[in-house]
Amino acid sequence: MACKNINITSEEVTKWHCKLFPEEYDMFYDSILESNLRAQGINPMSKEYIERVNKRRRSLGFSDFNVNGENGNTRAFVLRMLKQGKEGKLIAYLNKYKEGCGS
């Protein structure tokens, strides 16, 4: 698998990662209560959101979201896809699931 562009910036990876795995950024918007729940290992998000997130993650080959941070190397996945020139696949994932930071 040849790398199309080895000059992928950290900002570009973060942009794609945030769009594909927004649940890994939810903590930045937590209230004090939500933060306290996460500290106890409890996901403060709604059951529907958790189910939707986990379905998407499984379809991409990752385990269910864990609020304690053990979530597979999703960032490396994004970097690998970008280096392999598979932006089109990332776009297809985004279109299929319609979630992400700022969406």
Image (cartoon, rainbow, N blue to C red):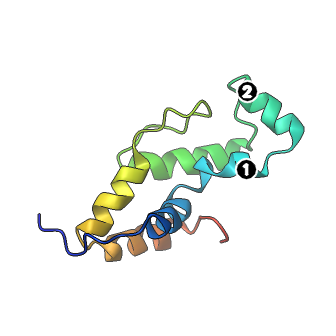
The one of 87 and 15 positioned closer to us in this rendering: 15
Which of pointers 1 and 2 lies earlier in the amino acid sequence?
1
Q: Is residue 5 above or below residue 26?
A: below
The one of 75 and 58 positioned closer to us in this rendering: 75
Place of residue 94 in the rendered image (x, y in percent of width and height, measured from the top left):
48, 69
Please give the residue where the numbered disc 2 appears in the rendered image: 39
Q: Label 1 crowding class (10 Å Cα cut-off): few <14, some 14-19, many 20+?
A: few
Place of residue 80 in the rendered image (x, y in percent of width and height, measured from the top left):
29, 59
Using the rendered image of the protein, determine whether residue 60 is visible from the camera's viewpoint: no
Place of residue 14 in the rendered image (x, y in percent of width and height, measured from the top left):
50, 62
Q: Quadrant of the rendered structure where residue 93 is?
A: bottom left
Q: Residue furthest right?
A: 32
Q: Is residue 67 above or below residue 30?
A: above
Please give the residue where the numbered disc 1 appears in the rendered image: 28
**Residue at (59% x, 48% y) in the render:** 24
The one of 8 and 70 positioned closer to us in this rendering: 8
Q: Secondary structure at mark 2?
A: helix
- Is 99 left or right of 43, judged from the image as shown? left
Identify the mark at residue 18; answer none if there is no mark. Answer: none
**Residue at (48% x, 74% y) in the render:** 95
Q: Secondary structure at mark 1?
A: helix
**Residue at (26% x, 67% y) in the render:** 83
Dot 1 amino acid type: Phe
Q: Residue furthest left?
A: 1
Q: Label 2 crowding class (10 Å Cα cut-off): few <14, some 14-19, many 20+?
A: few
In this rendering, the count of numbered labels is 2
Dot 2 amino acid type: Ala
Place of residue 102 in the rendered image (x, y in percent of width and height, measured from the top left):
67, 70
Q: Is residue 70 above or below residue 98?
A: above
